[in-house]
Image (cartoon, grey):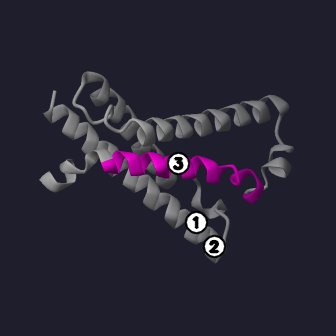
Amino acid sequence: MKIIFDHIELLVRLAGIGQICLAAGSTAIPGILNWKTELAKVNPLIRHIFWMYACYILVINFCFGFVSALCPNDLTNGSKLAVLTTGFIGVYWVSRICTQFFGFERKNFPKGKWLVFGETVLVSLFLFLCLVYGLAFYNNLQNL
């Protein structure tokens, strides 16, 4: 376990790069899932709220990514802020995993080899992010 904690800063940096890639790649989701047509069927207020939430999530993922990629030492230095931030980011990604498996009705997921592959890559990334921020949180707690 010590070898992992010796490289926690690198893992946080890699997690940051992963989140930036995730956020950049997620800009393709509206096209893949045909949001324009699907959202045309709902009340305009609901459509606007949906887009607002989607933008919030996109910005949060980019921000987590940039903070982690550019300042991994600040997220692993054992300070109270590092404990709280890595704890918050870890809970965020754990909730995303839970949503993936318990919040979505799976029968409506798109079919096809590439889409299944894409979901597998995404879930693997989500698990990696949960693990990295959980380890960083634990390491920060130990160094308080």
Is 27 or 107 nearer to us in this picture?
27
Q: Can residue 88 be seen in this view?
A: yes
Q: Which residue sits at x=73%, y=56%?
A: 33
| Residue that badge 2 annotates | 114
Badge 3: few (under 14), some or many (20 or more) residues near its Cα, within 10 Å?
Answer: few
* Chief secondary structure of the magenta portion: helix
Horizontal arrangement in the rendering, residue 40 relative to residue 124 (left or right)? right
Q: Which sits earlier in the primary sequence, circle 3 or circle 1? A: 3
Q: Which of pointers 3 and 2 lies earlier in the amino acid sequence?
A: 3
Q: Position of residue 7 (x, y in %)?
A: 24, 51
Quadrant of res 77: top left
Q: Which of marks 3 and 1 is in front?
A: 1
Q: Label 2 amino acid?
A: Trp
Q: Distance between the residues labelled 2 and 1?
A: 6 Å
Is 3 placed left or right of 16 in the picture? left
Contact (CB < 8 A) between labels 3 and 1? no
Residue occupied by mark 3: 103
- Residue stretch in magenta: 10-32
Give the x, y percent position of residue 50.
Answer: 71, 36
> In the rendered view of the protein, which quadrant contains the C terminus?
top left
Specify the farthest residue to the top.
Answer: 80
Q: Is residue 77 above or below residue 131?
A: above
The reply to whether discs 2 and 1 touch (Cβ–Cβ < 8 Å) is yes
Secondary structure at numbered mark 3: helix
Task: Using a 10 Å C-alpha cutoff, classify the residue at mark 1 as few (fewer than 14 neighbours), some (14 to 19) or many (20 or more).
Answer: few
**Where is mark 1, residue-wise?**
118
The question of residue 23 being in magenta is answered with yes
Residue under the image location 59 percent in, 37 percent down: 57
The residue shown at (84%, 32%) is: 44
Q: Residue at x 58, y 70 (%)?
A: 116
